[in-house]
Amino acid sequence: MKSLKIILILFLTRAVYAGSMASAGENGVLNVLDLGAMGDGKTIDTLAIQKTIDACAALGGGRVLLPAGKTFLSGALSLRSGVDLHIATGATLKGSPDWRDYLPTGSLLFAKDAVNVSVSGDGTIDGNDSALWQKLADEEAGGDINKDGWWPESFIGDWWPFGKKPGEPDQRGGRPMMVIFINCDKVRLYDVTLRAAPSWTVHLVGCHDVALSDISIRNSWEVANNDGIDIDHCRDVRIASSLIDSADDCIVIKNTPNFQSYGDCEHITVTGCTLASRSAALKVDEIYTGTARDIIFDGCVVSRSNRGLCIQLRDAGNIENVIFSNIVVETKFQPHKWWGAGEPIQITCFPRTAETKLGHVRNVRFSNIICRGENGLVFQGWPSSPLDDIVLDNVRLDLTEPAPGVGGFYDLRPQGVFKGVFQTKLPGIYIRQTHNFAMRNTRIVWSQPGDERYGAALDQDNSDGFEMQNVSLSPPISGF
């Protein structure tokens, strides 16, 4: 009798599976509930969801549905070519609180060498950051997430951008990213909300033909390294009409050292986004090798950010042909844990170490920019690599009254061989080590012209080929 029951269960299971496959064959949709997912927010549904993804791929592709009204708790999932992971309105894919559930990929959603892969739907992907931090603190810090000297690893698994090499064994706990796609073609991410990332939210590496649109990223303002979108060695990327609110950088273009085999980062547009960050809102940074080029940031609004529009070079790579246009920027100084001092625009270029062969930053345009911030604009090059061909055209800076305790210093971290945080009166525009720097139709307005923390309207040195046309730089203090 017992054997008969087992045979019957197996028969019914296969019948349900076959029925699901037939349904998917007819309409291209596989529901994860049909292959064993519970969606109760308590059961770890990783195996059932992965089974559904694999079955969908085996059918030649289609849609894997996480239906409305359910919360699916999961560890690492690997997406396949031709599969759209669709999170319906009212559905949540929530990350496991246990870091071990993300090994070996190091992320909640992972894809490598996939073609035509997407994540869609008006539902939510929740990184479960607070529960994961608490789990790590329980194991490493006696349960105290604020223990002096304790800080959980920023990454985990095989695919670190720097530090540990891919595949290198590592038994330490750490924080997973939410999305890692590597060497994928035709990547689409749209409509979905991502929140509570423990580490980087979306990390795209060596991908081609990428479109991210109408997504919302809402992360904690207390968690470091929870970047919104990191575009790493990618080509032909469009990011549009999205909202990102995160403690760390919102959108970063980069070439990290562990993925240098994927070549340059180029042909990228970021348009119509609304951004807020305790670090930098729009940024080109960490170009360790190769070149980041042909990049446009247009039609964005930046608010409450420590740095607004930012380019940083500390390594051998190059940054060139970058346009920031039609952007409104508001900056506010954030505590010293966060790099920056309320600069609406900042470009810095100096070597990370004394041995670094520094690359170049050139051909950068700022056009139709309205800035309102507690600090001025900063442009710092290096004697062997001056900032080359920088243009400000129709830029307005309203220097607001700094909050109590704010002002009187610059923050150029990451500092490399150069000074990081240093005391100085705040000029409207600070320029060092540049070649062919032009300001046209540019104006500075001082909200508190007698504030003793202000310095000269223009503090410029070691700049050749300097040009000004129709520039209003009224001095903030009599005598400058």
Image: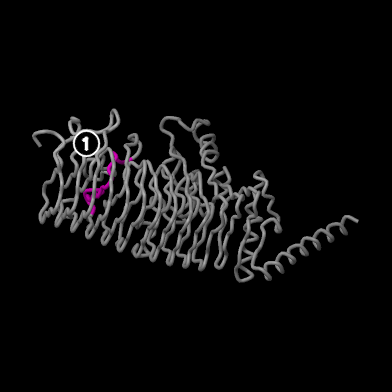
Residue 41 x, y percent position in the rendering: 65, 45
The answer to whether one can see residue 330 in this image is yes
Which SS class for mark 1?
A: strand
Q: Nearer the viewer, residue 14 or 278?
A: 278
Residue 363 x, y percent position in the rendering: 22, 60
Residue 442 falls left or right of residue 175: left
Q: Main secondary structure of the magenta part?
A: loop
Residue lying at 32% horizontally and 60% vertically, measured from the top left: 296
Residue 245 x, y percent position in the rendering: 43, 45
Inspect the magenta stretch and tell me whether residue 341 lies in it.
Answer: yes
Give the residue pinned by disc 1.
422
The amino acid at mark 1 is Phe
Residue range (magenta)? 339-356
Classify 375 as above or below 56. Answer: above
Residue 422 falls left or right of residue 156: left
User: Which residue ends up furthest to the top in the rendered image?
Assistant: 404
Classify 26 as above or below 166. Answer: below
Q: Nearer the viewer, residue 298 or 205?
A: 298
Say which quadrant the C terminus sits in: top left
User: Which residue ends up furthest to the left in the rendered image?
Assistant: 479
Inspect the magenta stretch and tell me whether residue 198 lies in it.
Answer: no
Q: How many marks?
A: 1
Residue lying at 53% horizontally and 46% vertically, measured from the top left: 127
Residue lying at 62% horizontally and 53% vertically, measured from the top left: 46
Residue lying at 41% horizontally and 32% vertically, measured from the top left: 149
| Residue 260, image quadrant | bottom left
Question: How crowded is the residue under tag 1: few (<14 C-alpha within 10 Å), some, or many (20+)?
Answer: few
Say which quadrant the N terminus sits in: bottom right
